[in-house]
Image (cartoon, rainbow, N blue to C red):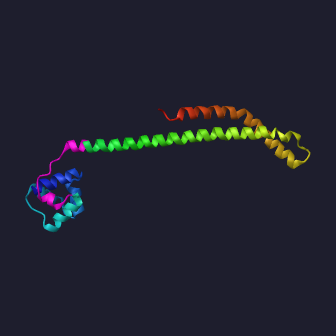
Amino acid sequence: MLKENIKTSRKLKGLSQEELAIKLNVVRQTISKWEQGLSVPDSEMLISISEVLETPVSTLLGETIIESKIDDIKTISEKLEIINLQLSQKKISKRKTFHRLFILLCAVIVIISAILIALDSSYLDWNFNNPETAVVGTIMHAFEWLFVRVAPIILIGGILGIILTRKKI
């Protein structure tokens, strides 16, 4: 029983005889002899084997360990289910973030438009002979000119973004 349990536990951990030997500080032939039943590890080595293979000593000394392919498939499917759930939650979170950003973008455009309407292009009445007001007036005029031409396109894109990222029922 011990020889089969060591071999099966080693394979379940995905270790070769050489890798297990390195972890236990023995030569590969020693592992081979244990698995063939030609020799038996002492009690201290048995404890080391159980720690490396993450298997209780009682299991190594007890009943035969049976490799279960069904359990492996079940474990893999459970892990895949968890990964799929995490990916879907990440996708939902990303969608919500974009949705909020589109709403914020539209709100900022509306607020800036309201401010520009309220100001009623006050820079047109400024004294452009004064260099300081001329520069500020020119900058405000350029901003308003650009904003009036670009904002409708951005607003339409933002509204489309809100529609496309809304929660699907």
Q: Examine the structure image and report whether residue 137 is included in the region drawn in magenta.
A: no
Residue at 42 percent of width and 40 percent of height? 88
Residue at 38 percent of width and 42 percent of height? 85
Q: Nearer the viewer, residue 130 or 156?
A: 156
Q: Which residues are magenta?
A: 55-73
The quarter of the picture where residue 73 lies is top left
The quarter of the picture where residue 154 lies is top right
Residue occupying the far front of the picture:
169
Residue occupying the far bottom of the picture:
44
Q: Give the x, y percent position of residue 40.
A: 10, 62
Q: Give the x, y percent position of residue 32.
A: 14, 56
Residue at 86 percent of width and 39 percent of height? 124
- Whether residue 132 is visible to the viewer of this picture, yes or no, is yes
Residue at 20 percent of width and 64 percent of height? 48
Vertical order, 168 against 137 (above or below): above
* 92 sits left or right of 130 in the view: left
Q: Give the x, y percent position of residue 167.
A: 50, 35
Vertical order, 37 against 160 (above or below): below
